Structures are given as structure tokens and as C-alpha cells.
Image: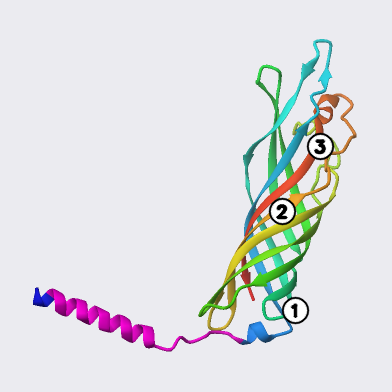
């Protein structure tokens, strides 16, 4: 019993000594700079919100039902430009490139798969974001973000491709609103951040131009709105 009490007293003493040690605050200058820069890398998944038209085609009044099949991991890189507005608020511009893919399955009336289309995208990202930071806790600081992102799809399917069974075309330009949260880690020589972000496209990106031999695919979609989930690693 005495040994157990001795161990407990030693642990309590060790905890008290550890709690009284001064915490070294790393890399404090970055929060005082009016402007600073960095870079970001990360992973994403791209998605569509599909609004079906329920239009019929052919003599038997068939219907095609489009649906997203599964989510495919993508990749993105960018540059961080940060403007300090006050102690808790920053304005950020993070231009970059995001690569990814979306798969659309088309079902018939009997829920049989008729076709699968792989839609590849290479986005030029131009996000403008406000970053609201909490009070720094030792060498960490949580934050939330919100803003808009203008994206241009450089790899969209400009033409129909019968060899790959691509029978819809996408518009290149879209505007997204974005929201997310993250955590800053202050290291000895730089600030490292982990951030999650969700982007919602507000424009209809499907072209109304149908393929001559397969118009039912374009006609089966009333609206196609982009979605994107991103996990980013920032180095500043």
C-alpha cells in the first residue's frame, strides 16, 4: 500500500512540475505579418448533384436515370497568399489546380445499367476566402473559413467521344461557395495547417447540346451542379 501511495505522490509531483514548465511558443512572427505566402497540397473527391429531367425517348417511351456511381480520389496543389486584417481575421487567395474524376451511371426503367461515363476535370481554382481564427492555444489554433471560388475546367469534354461512350458535354465555367474548418500547428520554422473544405457549385454545368445519335443522355439531365470535398495541407 505504501508503494502505491508513493507512486501516486511521485506522479502528482511530476504532473505539477510539468504543468509549471514554460511553454515555448514557436514561429510567432507569422501572425504579425501583414502579408505572407506559402503553398498547399491535398486530396479531393468531386461529385455532381444531378437533377433528372425524366424525359422519355424512343417508341417505347423509355427513360434514362442518371446517378453518380462512386467517388474517385483526386489531387490539388496551390499557392497561399494571406492578408492579415486583424488579430482574428485573414483574407486569403489560394490559386491552384485541382484534378479529379466523376462517374455517372445511366439506368433504364428496369434499373439496369445502360452506360457509364467517366467525366475527368482539371480545374483552375481562384478561391477568395475569409479565415476566422480563434485565440492561439500554445502552438495550435483552430479556425473556420468561408468564401467563393471561381473555377474553370480545362479538361472538360468539349466534344462527344463515342469510343469512350461520352455523350454529354460540360460548360467550363462555374462559381462555388465554400465553407470549412482547420487547425494551425506552429512549428519551429513554419506554420503547418490541416484543413477540410466543402465546395458547392451554383451554376448548371451540363451543356444543352445533345449528341446527334445519342440525344437521350443530355436530355435525361435537367441540371448538373458540381460538388467538391477537399482535404488540404498548408505550409506557411
Against 183, residue 214 (above or below) is: above
What residue sits right under mark 1 in the picture?
85
Name the residue carrying label 3.
223
| First in residue order: circle 2 vs circle 1 | 1
Q: Position of residue 221 (x, y in %)?
A: 80, 32
* Circle 2: element type: strand
Answer left or right for 177 relative to 139: right
| Pick the front one: 166 or 151 | 151
Residue holding disc 2: 199
Highlighted magenta segment, given as a residue range: 4-28
Q: Helix or strand or loop: what does disc 1 sit on?
A: loop
Q: Magenta: predominant secondary structure element?
A: helix
Residue 212 appears in which quarter of the rendering?
top right
Asked whether residue 94 is in view, the answer is no
How many numbered marks does the figure carry?
Answer: 3
Which disc number belongs to residue 39?
none
Residue 111, image quadrant: top right
Which residue is at the front of the view, 230 or 178? 178
Q: Residue at x 82, y 19 (%)?
A: 56
Amino acid at each position: 500500500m505504501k508503494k502505491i501511495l508513493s507512486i501516486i505522490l511521485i506522479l502528482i509531483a511530476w504532473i505539477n512540475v510539468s504543468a509549471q514548465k514554460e511553454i515555448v511558443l514557436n514561429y510567432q512572427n507569422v501572425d504579425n505579418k501583414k502579408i505572407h505566402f506559402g503553398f498547399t497540397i491535398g486530396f479531393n473527391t468531386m461529385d455532381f448533384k444531378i437533377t433528372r429531367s425524366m424525359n422519355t425517348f424512343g417508341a417505347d417511351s423509355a427513360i434514362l436515370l442518371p446517378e453518380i456511381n462512386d467517388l474517385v480520389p483526386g489531387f490539388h496543389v496551390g499557392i497561399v497568399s494571406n492578408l492579415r486584417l486583424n488579430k482574428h481575421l485573414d483574407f486569403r487567395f489560394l490559386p491552384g489546380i485541382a484534378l479529379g474524376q466523376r462517374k455517372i451511371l445511366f439506368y433504364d426503367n428496369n434499373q439496369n445499367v445502360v452506360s457509364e461515363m467517366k467525366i475527368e476535370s482539371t480545374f483552375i481554382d481562384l478561391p477568395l476566402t475569409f479565415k476566422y481564427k480563434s485565440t492561439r492555444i500554445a502552438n495550435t489554433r483552430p479556425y473556420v473559413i468561408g468564401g467563393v471560388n471561381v473555377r474553370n475546367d480545362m479538361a472538360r469534354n468539349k466534344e462527344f467521344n463515342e469510343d469512350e461512350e461520352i455523350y454529354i458535354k460540360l460548360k467550363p465555367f462555374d462559381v462555388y461557395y465554400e465553407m470549412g474548418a482547420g487547425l494551425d500547428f506552429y512549428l519551429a520554422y513554419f506554420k503547418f495547417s490541416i484543413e477540410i473544405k466543402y465546395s458547392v457549385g451554383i451554376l448548371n454545368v451540363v451543356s444543352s447540346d445533345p449528341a446527334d445519335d445519342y440525344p437521350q443522355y443530355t436530355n435525361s439531365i435537367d441540371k448538373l451542379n458540381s460538388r467538391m470535398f477537399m482535404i488540404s495541407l498548408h505550409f506557411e
